[in-house]
Amino acid sequence: MLVLGIESTAHTASVGVVDETAKVLALASSMHRPEHGGIHPREAANHHVDVLPELVGRALEEGRVRPSELDAVAFAQGPGLGPCLRAGATVGRMLSMAWRRPLVPVNHCVAHVEIARVLSGLDDPILLYASGGNTQVIAYARGRYRVLGETLDVGIGNFLDKLWIEFGGTFPGGPALEREALEGRELHPLPYSVHGMDVAFSGMMTATLALRARGVPRPDLAYSVEATAYAMLTEITERALAHLRGEGVVLGGGVACNQRLQGMVRAMVEGRGGTMFAPPRSLCVDNGAMIAWTGLLAHRLGVHVSVAASGVQPRQRTDLVTTPWRESPAERRVAAAPPPVG
Ligand code: AMP
Ligand code: MG
């Protein structure tokens, strides 16, 4: 079984092809990099419209796959930036109609979990999803993936990117701050905002910029920001692991490529006797292969959508989509039963 998946929720347009063993036969990606400032949704969408046809061609060529060999076409339905989502969805609909293959809608956050889950070999891991726009701790419970904790303001990646731009750099800021932080020597206290299972970053932004204005060296600030922000993420992930008595943690999202974050989460998880897994960079960041793989799981159970009903959902929440491939037969019966009265 072969499925082609299209990712276009934010700055990256990507097309992947996977088979039923989760082997990635092809992955072709292109990231929109603005010259100044952050991501503008319309500009990113224009980029995706420009590159997606070529990415589809490249993926088919790289995977040595003919359209007739594909079983379904999957696309990221949400959450994400509206214009960007529509660019990918339009290509998905056209391919589905032209190739006469079913169209499968995929939730982007669920796709991060599923690719990490299959690569890790863990059956029921907790996902720490740390990307540009999203910061969530996700776990499966009774028919759905649930968001156990999340950012109360901006995504961690957006926070790092904005900070780096305030420091005079360009997008993306996360990798640049990681390099800068390696030179950091002094830890400056910054607001540590953990509220139950949630986190917030705007106080840290204000405090860091104030320290910068007072002449604190950039490497020390980069180091302090990483140490504080990643400790916050590690703490809420640990609480989820402790409450669920989970077997392990998988990572997803661009910020999850960060070595310091990986080291902190690994130390925490292994200290509790669990397993930590981070996918290789190409499958940790936004990518078409994770959409294809999750699309394949859904397609096997007949989860398809008509073109007319395939509208994008920029605010689609992780816990609003069903994931029937994860349900036991008993759970499926509960999910199908009418809601209790009264
Ligand atoms: P995503 O939205 O998942 O594609 O990830 C993009 C985000 O990840 C951007 O905000 C980047 O700044 C951030 N990012 C990428 N690599 C790293 C890294 N090594 N450390 C921290 N942040 C990173
Ligand atoms: Mg993502």
Image (cartoon, helix red, strand yellow):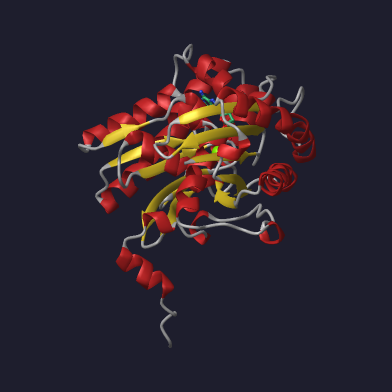
Expressed as whole percent of the image width and height from the top left, the position of residue 273 reads 20, 37
Query: Do we see residue 206 in this rendering?
Result: no
Q: Residue at x 52, y 15 (%)?
A: 179
Looking at the rendering, the quadrant in which ligand 1 lies is top right
Image quadrant assignment for residue 269: top left
Residue farthest to the bottom? 342
Q: Residue at x 60, y 46 (%)?
A: 76
Depth check, front residue: 181 or 38: 38
Q: How many marks?
A: 0
Would you place residue 47 above or below residue 241 in this image? above
Horizontally, residue 262 falls left or right of residue 82, namely left
Residue farthest to the top? 183
Expressed as whole percent of the image width and height from the top left, the position of residue 34 reads 74, 26
Query: Do we see residue 176 in this rendering?
Result: yes
Expressed as whole percent of the image width and height from the top left, the position of residue 300 reads 45, 52
Residue farthest to the left? 273
Image quadrant assignment for residue 311: bottom right
Horizontally, residue 81 falls left or right of residue 301, namely right
Depth check, front residue: 147 or 70: 70
Q: Residue at x 44, y 51 (%)?
A: 149
Horizontally, residue 22 falls left or right of residue 125, namely right
Would you place residue 342 above or below residue 14 in this image? below
Depth check, front residue: 166 or 44: 44
> Which quarter of the rendering shows the C terminus?
bottom left
